[in-house]
Amino acid sequence: MNKRANIPWERIESRLAEIGKDQAWLRSTLGIEPNVITNWKSRGAPSGKAVAIAQALDLSTDQLLGLSSSLVQVPGGIRVVIDDGNSPNHYQIKKVKLNLRAGVTGFQTIPDIYDGDTVSIAKNWVDRRGFHPGTLIALTVVGESMEPNLYEGDVVVVNTSDTAMKDGAVFAFNYDGEAVIKRLVKERGDWWLFSDNVDQARHRPKGCRSGECIIIGRVVKRETDHI
């Protein structure tokens, strides 16, 4: 078997620029000395280091070694990485169904295993926004009341530590014992739960009164198959 060629430094340097990191960060992450980087610049990084380098750069080894077509750059495109659930660069957020009771602030969760019981989210996305992964849950949208912004079957991530009422924000609610996702709107001094669906005759606003309208958390992210 032929030995794989070294990894061109230009490929590593380009990826560092994409993720906003520098050589010092790479040295620290990999635990290597400055002279090692100097050697890589002239000779390329050894293919035996491909796994460690790929993990640090949030790439697959095939992508790093130039064996994957996904390295082709498309203007405005976002790179897709297949996560095996053990990636050090992602948090696994519990995907759940809610078990609620009317008038009760707390809630219980039941694993939602239809499409897997976790949702993988990039750590840098979560950390950059100051979220704590332990306070995030993922829910599947039910119904069409929030179309065209949320479709049935979409998965939303809810920050359960953010329950402060905010005009225009989308929240998950315990509405009299029912789990609903609505837009919170303040009108004439009162709070209302609005649907985004333009058919307001079918999706009428609901009053948000203490006791029957309890905020579970704010919707901070969605995943959708609707194109």
Image (cartoon, rainbow, N blue to C red):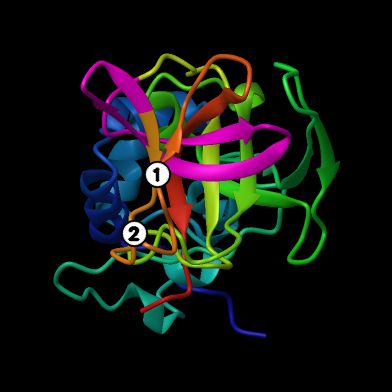
Q: Residue at x 36, y 79 (%)?
A: 227
Q: How many angstroms separate mark 1 from mark 2 (CA)?
A: 8 Å
Residue bearing mark 1: 205
**In the rendered view, does 210 fall on the left or right side of 35?**
right
Looking at the picture, does residue 39 appear above or below residue 42?
Answer: above
**Residue 186: x, y in percent?**
27, 25
Q: Residue at x 40, y 29 (%)?
A: 27
Q: Quadrant of residue 89?
A: top right
Residue 172 part of the magenta-drawn span: yes
Q: Residue at x 28, y 38 (%)?
A: 38
Looking at the picture, does residue 113 appear above or below residue 86?
Answer: below
Asked if residue 15 shows in the view, the reply is yes
- Which region shows up in magenta? 166-191
**Residue 64: x, y in percent?**
43, 64
Residue bearing mark 2: 200
**In the rendered view, does 154 fall on the left or right side of 17?**
right
Q: Secondary structure at mark 2?
A: loop
Mark 1 surroundings within 10 Å by alpha-carbon count, few (fewer than 14), some (14 through 19), many (20 or more): some
Find out whether the residues at labels 1 and 2 contact each other: C-beta distance under 8 Å: yes
The residue type indicated by label 1 comes to Pro
**In the rendered view, does 114 fall on the left or right side of 208?**
right
Q: Quadrant of the N terminus?
A: bottom right
